[in-house]
Image (cartoon, rainbow, N blue to C red):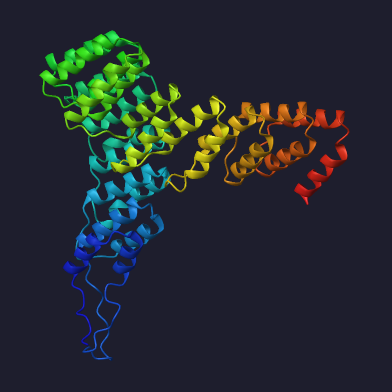
């Protein structure tokens, strides 16, 4: 059997694009021709593989999406040594975005500083990518530091100002956002849908409905910008929050007239609003309209239905929705399960809640800190002290901590029940996880002194410090 032909750079790029496993893609990139060419003279040195820029782009994107940053950094170091081509700035913009989504602002800053060492010039594109990454990481001080020296690299554009407008609006600082907006206009830059979307979102966040609607009208009349679905969604959500469904549906009709496509977020908001005011028939009618319009239900819409069924204590229907989600290729998120867990616990169905909690990993969803807290509080309120203690142990082991109010009430219950063994076990778990508040420690000390348990407590403290 003849050995396989050596891979060409073009073939490597094709294989990398087809490979779904980022780890296998990484190894393939590093060693594209593991079998040596039998026709090569043993005394002839092996020629290095001539990687293409496309191959670098594909593997870096795969590793970044998989958060395999050590492997990605290794590829970037190798890319820096290439002399046959210059990587495009968009490649670094993508990597900076990966770092931002992963909460790694320092790595994003470091890469931005290193871009010139790849013989690539930094423009406003990479600056905006860095600003957006810092925004995702809540690094406002570093954003301002970059803004001060931004003109050393390039002139800020509409996207630059949009990032700062969004930051201020998301923090409820609409007055500061307007100042940025005015500065943007003074530079001759035109606002776009994202600009107005952020401002309208900020106004709605501050309950300034009148100003939000005025801006929506002005953006069309003064600036010639047609509101998009995101802007309508902010306004409709705000109206549903205050129960003004009449005006919310007027906006929906306006969207249809202006041929702005209604997305699942709009439908979910309106369906939720109808449920809140008890208009169930209208809500299910809108759900049917959504389906007929070809708008696919997403997790938010399904969660609205789950929440409504749980409110009506129709858990069978809620579980049917979960199963339907799986059947339609819409994987339930942990919040979907937490909605059901919370309601089961609140109505005292702690057995069913425990069963669902145990079943979550089999369903492909790992319980998060909220799942543990819900079940712990539910078991505690149901006086299931031993089961609650087991959940607490597991929670602490995973690095989670209970709600302060929940653990305080639980310890108080154990003290009232004079359950000395479980109290010491709970204190032991909390101490191991460094999750025992000072006030709780004082309460427990007062109880053990009263009940003459100091010897047992000191033995537990000794076991922790030894």
Where residue 104 sits in the image (x, y, percent)?
A: 42, 45
Where residue 266 sits in the image (x, y, percent)?
A: 25, 24
Q: Looking at the picture, does residue 222 appear above or below residue 408?
A: above
Q: Looking at the picture, does residue 195 appear above or below residue 72?
A: above
State which quadrant residue 395 falls in.
top right
Question: 224 and 152: which one is in front?
Answer: 224
Q: Looking at the picture, does residue 277 appear above or below residue 168?
A: above
On the question of residue 92 being in view, the answer is yes
Question: 196 and 309: which one is in front?
Answer: 309
Q: Residue at x 83, y 45 (%)?
A: 459
Q: Residue at x 32, y 14 (%)?
A: 279
In the rendered structure, the answer to whether residue 18 lies left or right of residue 453 reads left
Question: 9 and 362: which one is in front?
Answer: 362
Question: 362 and 103: which one is in front?
Answer: 362
On the question of residue 224 being in view, the answer is no
Where residue 428 sits in the image (x, y, percent)?
A: 73, 42
In the rendered structure, the answer to whether residue 458 lies left or right of residue 412 reads right
Q: Looking at the picture, does residue 110 appear above or below residue 136?
A: below
State which quadrant residue 1 falls in.
bottom left
In the rendered structure, the answer to whether residue 399 lies left or right of residue 184 reads right
Where residue 294 sits in the image (x, y, percent)?
A: 17, 32
Q: Residue at x 47, y 43 (%)?
A: 360
State which quadrant residue 149 falls in.
top left
Counting the numbered discs, the total is: 0
In the rendered structure, the answer to whether residue 219 lies left or right of residue 426 reads left
């Amino acid at each position: 059997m003849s050995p396989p032909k050596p891979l060409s750079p073009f073939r490597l790029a094709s294989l990398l694009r087809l490979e779904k496993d980022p780890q296998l893609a990484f190894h393939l990139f590093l060693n594209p021709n593991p079998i040596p060419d039998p026709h090569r003279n043993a005394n002839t040195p092996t020629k290095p593989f001539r990687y293409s820029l496309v191959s670098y782009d594909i593997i870096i994107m795969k590793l970044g999406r998989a958060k395999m940053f050590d492997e990605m950094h290794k590829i970037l170091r190798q890319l820096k040594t290439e002399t046959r081509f210059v990587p495009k700035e968009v490649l670094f913009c993508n990597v900076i975005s990966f770092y931002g989504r992963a909460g790694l602002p320092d790595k994003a800053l470091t890469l931005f500083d290193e871009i010139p060492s790849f013989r690539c010039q930094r423009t406003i594109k990479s600056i905006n990518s860095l600003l957006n990454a810092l925004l995702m990481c809540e690094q406002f001080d570093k954003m301002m530091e970059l803004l001060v020296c931004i003109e050393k690299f390039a002139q800020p554009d509409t996207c630059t100002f949009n990032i700062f407008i969004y930051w201020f609006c998301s923090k409820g600082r609409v007055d500061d956002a307007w100042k940025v907006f005015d500065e943007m206009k003074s530079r001759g830059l035109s606002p776009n849908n994202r600009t107005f979307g952020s401002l309208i979102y900020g106004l709605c966040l501050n309950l300034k409905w009148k100003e939000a609607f005025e801006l929506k009208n002005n953006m069309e009349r003064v600036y010639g910008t047609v509101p998009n679905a995101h802007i309508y969604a902010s306004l409709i959500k705000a109206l549903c929050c205050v129960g003004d469904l009449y005006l919310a549906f007027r906006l929906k009709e306006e969207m249809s007239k202006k041929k702005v496509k209604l997305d699942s977020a709009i439908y979910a908001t309106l369906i939720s609003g109808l449920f809140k005011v008890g208009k169930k028939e209208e809500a299910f009618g809108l759900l049917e309209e959504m389906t007929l319009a070809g708008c696919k239900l997403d997790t938010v819409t399904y969660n609205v239905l789950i929440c409504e069924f749980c409110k009506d204590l129709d858990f069978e229907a809620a579980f049917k929705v979960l199963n339907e989600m799986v059947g339609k290729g819409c994987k339930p998120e942990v919040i979907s399960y937490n909605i059901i867990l919370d309601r089961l616990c609140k109505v005292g169905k702690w057995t069913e809640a425990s069963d669902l909690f145990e079943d979550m990993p089999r369903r492909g969803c790992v319980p998060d800190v909220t799942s543990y807290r819900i079940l712990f509080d539910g078991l505690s309120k149901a006086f299931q002290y031993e089961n609650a203690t087991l959940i607490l142990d597991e929670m602490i082991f995973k690095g989670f901590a209970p709600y302060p109010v929940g653990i305080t009430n639980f310890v108080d219950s154990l003290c009232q029940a004079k359950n000395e063994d479980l109290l010491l076990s709970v204190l032991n778990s909390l101490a191991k996880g460094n999750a025992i508040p000072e006030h709780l420690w004082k309460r427990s000390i007062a109880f053990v002194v009263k009940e003459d348990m100091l010897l047992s407590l000191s033995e537990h403290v000794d076991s922790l410090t030894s």
